[in-house]
């Protein structure tokens, strides 16, 4: 089921279930997982996308192995707040996942997540371009998921 908000998704979770954050790109899926208390996001992996059926099988395995109760999918909203082709593509990905897996889904505005992560990796971690390329997607998923988790804390 696609929920209208992160709060609605969290309210639908069984006790101690975790959330899986996704940064959906055309070539990769960055992934991050929350703790069971829904406080902290941790990056876990990046899936090199092949085709949807393979991608969703990998997601199903991660969901089962990590006791995932819901997905937080980053939505690449434009800076002016409009939704362009990238948003439509991500929303379609979410709808396709929803049709195949029994897991709650909510979208989270990910404006500037990748650029914030890139800045951090350059300025704070002093990471080379090649090393950044290896971690930026899962770090962006962590940034997305942590934003959603922080919004839950603020609404309590």
Image: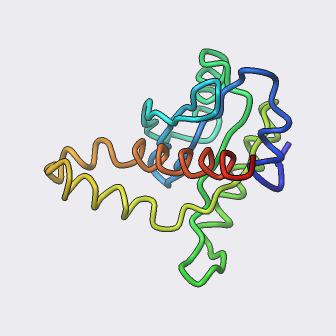
The quadrant of the rendering that contains the N terminus is: top right
Q: Classify 137 as above or below 15.
A: below
Front in this rendered view, residue 97 or 147: 147
Residue drawn 59% across and 48% down?
A: 150
Q: Quadrant of residue 70?
A: top right
Residue drawn 47% across and 43% down?
A: 142
How many numbered callouts? 0
Front in this rendered view, residue 123 or 102: 123
Q: Quadrant of residue 88?
A: bottom right
Q: Quadrant of residue 84?
A: bottom right
User: Where does the image place residue 112, in percent across and percent down from the top left?
Assistant: 45, 67
Q: Is residue 19 left or right of residue 122?
A: right
User: Where does the image place residue 69, in percent across and percent down from the top left?
Assistant: 74, 28
Q: Is residue 84 left or right of residue 156?
A: left
User: Where does the image place residue 148, in percent across and percent down from the top left?
Assistant: 62, 49
Front in this rendered view, residue 56 or 118: 118
Residue drawn 53% across and 45% down?
A: 146
Q: Classify 98 as above or below 69.
A: below
């Amino acid at each position: 089921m696609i929920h209208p908000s992160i709060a609605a998704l969290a309210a639908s979770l069984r006790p101690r279930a975790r959330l899986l954050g996704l940064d959906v790109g055309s070539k990769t899926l960055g992934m991050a997982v929350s703790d069971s208390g829904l406080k902290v996001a941790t990056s876990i992996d990046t899936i090199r996308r092949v085709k949807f059926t393979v991608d969703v099988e990998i997601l199903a395995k991660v969901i089962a192995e990590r006791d995932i109760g819901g997905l937080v999918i980053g939505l690449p909203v434009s800076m002016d707040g409009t939704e362009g082709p990238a948003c439509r593509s991500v929303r379609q990905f979410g709808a396709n996942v929803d049709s195949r897996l029994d897991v709650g889904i909510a979208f989270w505005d990910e404006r500037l997540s990748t650029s914030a992560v890139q800045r951090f990796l350059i300025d704070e971690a002093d990471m080379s371009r090649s090393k950044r390329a290896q971690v930026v997607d899962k770090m962006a998923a962590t940034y997305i998921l942590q934003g959603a988790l922080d919004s839950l804390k603020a609404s309590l």
